[in-house]
């Protein structure tokens, strides 16, 4: 089926230009235009759309207000701002309702790839209510201790951008949100950045303060969610998997961008568990504690209950947020790399191996966490496994767990 995309702008010549720009996509996309927010909402009430791309500054109802309404009424719709607006206050307001922000002038390649990547995993989630829930999410909850730590650091008259970057680098939710902002053009930095510490430096102290203290882009995990998961173990496993994946990618002499993405992919690969625990805590608790067949497979229990696993849930949100494709792919396939259509030594293989080795190090070698030997054999890297084990054990013994 064609993607149904609604472009919203009060400038007729802009809408005409977008239609001309997207003409090459007419076999894949069905494009509709609206001259403002009210017209867009009227169209949405009468037909379904996959994506809304809106200008920021429009009379009557601006882009932030429009996407806020779309988020409430039609949460499954992908929400993108396309604007030349540089007013800091309006950009800050757009951070929560928009999945991505694209700056005008925007090339057709950037616009096409942003829309396609955002919608690339939509078929993974057949459950409409789950798709709506995930699309509505604007933050992944953080560990309460780290959440309080970041608030205290930002509130201090001596707050340090280096310390702030270090705190964010230790938290799954904060890392994902910061990467969303810099991998899109919210603050003019649309570029491939995989390090939260680098992202924080680019955004600057005052912007980070405004985002966290005023816009409240971070949230802390509540007690009911924490009773579902062994959260300390999830965080420790995610950090260690990031370190192991980076260690493996480095050992295989991957490019620096791949090494950085491997660390972030490992850090974020279990984000779906946090999403399920925070938003569907009762059902997810039953998945984790209830009786299971097939050798006690949590993945199978997740699929029976939700129609998908935590891997696909996490990947869906990260794709909506515009994170690098390598990281999204590694999140989606970290348990089943052999099903990934791209077979190459890279972020996915490093994250898969790092995740499995970290579980093995803690005696958690169940069916869900086994290495895919056939996949590693196909890539002709299975013989490297003993070296990876030694290097990862060395990294663990050295207590690495920080974003370098």
Image: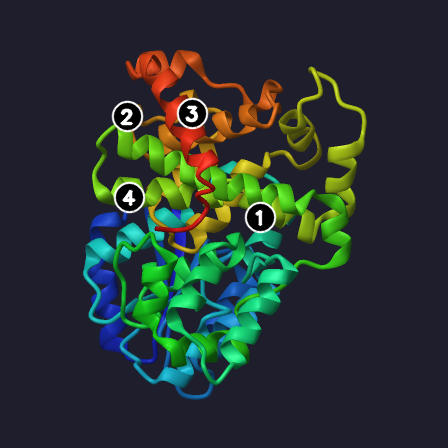
Q: Furthest residue to the front?
A: 398
What residue do we see at 23% from left, 43% from top?
Answer: 256
The 10 Å Cα crowd at callout 3, few under 14, some 14 to 19, many 20 or more, is: many
66 or 287: nearer the viewer: 287
Q: Can residue 49 be seen in this view?
A: yes
For residue 182, side relative to residue 125 (left or right): left
Tell me if label 3 and label 2 are in contact, CB under 8 Å.
no
Secondary structure found at label 2: loop
Give the mark nearest the N terminus, 2 or 1: 1
Give the mark nearest the N terminus, 3 or 2: 3
The 10 Å Cα crowd at callout 1, few under 14, some 14 to 19, many 20 or more, is: many
Residue that numbered label 2 is attached to: 344
- The answer to which quarter of the image holds residue 95 is bottom left
For residue 123, side relative to residue 349 (left or right): right
Image x and y of residue 212, in percent = 51, 74
Residue that numbered label 3 is attached to: 337
What residue do we see at 31% from left, 80% from top?
Answer: 85
Tell me if label 3 and label 1 are in contact, CB under 8 Å.
no
Residue that numbered label 4 is attached to: 27
Residue that numbered label 1 is attached to: 131
State which mark lies toward you, 1 or 4: 1
Secondary structure found at label 4: loop
The 10 Å Cα crowd at callout 4, few under 14, some 14 to 19, many 20 or more, is: few
Secondary structure found at label 1: helix
Picture layout, residue 357 above or below residue 232: above
CA gap, disc 4 and disc 3: 31 Å
- The answer to which quarter of the image holds residue 383 is top left
CA gap, disc 2 and disc 1: 30 Å
């Amino acid at each position: 089926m064609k993607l149904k995309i609604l472009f919203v702008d009060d400038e007729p010549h802009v809408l005409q230009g977008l239609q001309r720009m997207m003409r090459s996509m007419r076999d894949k996309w069905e494009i509709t235009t609206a001259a403002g927010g009210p017209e867009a909402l009227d169209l949405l009430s009468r037909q379904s759309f996959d994506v809304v791309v809106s200008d920021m500054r429009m009379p009557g109802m601006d882009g932030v207000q429009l996407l806020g309404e779309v988020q409430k009424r039609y949460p499954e719709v992908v929400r993108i701002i396309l604007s030349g607006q540089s007013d800091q206050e309006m950009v800050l307001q757009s951070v929560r309702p928009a999945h991505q922000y694209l700056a005008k002038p925007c090339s057709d390649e950037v616009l096409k790839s942003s829309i396609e990547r955002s919608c690339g995993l939509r078929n993974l989630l057949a459950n409409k209510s789950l798709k709506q829930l995930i699309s509505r999410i604007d933050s992944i909850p953080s560990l309460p201790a780290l959440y309080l730590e970041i608030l205290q650091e930002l509130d201090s008259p001596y707050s340090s951008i280096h310390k702030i970057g270090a705190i964010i680098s230790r938290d799954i939710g904060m890392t994902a949100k910061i990467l969303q902002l810099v991998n899109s053009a919210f603050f003019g930095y649309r570029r491939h950045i995989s390090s939260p510490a680098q992202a924080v430096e680019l955004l600057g102290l005052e912007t980070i303060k405004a985002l966290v203290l005023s816009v409240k882009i971070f949230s802390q995990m509540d007690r009911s969610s924490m009773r579902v998961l062994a959260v300390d173990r999830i965080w420790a496993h995610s950090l260690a998997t990031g370190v192991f994946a980076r260690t493996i990618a480095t050992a295989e002499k991957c490019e620096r961008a791949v090494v950085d993405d491997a660390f972030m992919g490992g850090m974020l690969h279990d984000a779906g568990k946090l999403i399920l625990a925070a938003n569907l805590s009762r059902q997810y608790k039953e998945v984790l504690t209830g009786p299971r067949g097939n050798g006690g497979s949590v993945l199978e229990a997740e699929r029976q209950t939700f129609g998908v696993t935590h891997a696909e849930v996490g990947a869906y949100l990260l794709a909506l947020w515009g994170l690098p494709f390598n990281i999204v792919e590694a999140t989606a396939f970290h348990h089943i790399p052999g099903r990934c259509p791209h077979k190459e030594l890279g972020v996915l293989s490093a994250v898969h191996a790092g995740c499995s080795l970290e579980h093995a190090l803690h005696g958690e070698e169940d069916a869900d966490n086994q290495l895919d030997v056939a996949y590693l054999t196909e890539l002709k890297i299975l013989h490297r496994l003993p070296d990876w084990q030694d290097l990862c054990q060395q990294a663990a013994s050295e207590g690495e767990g920080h974003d370098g």
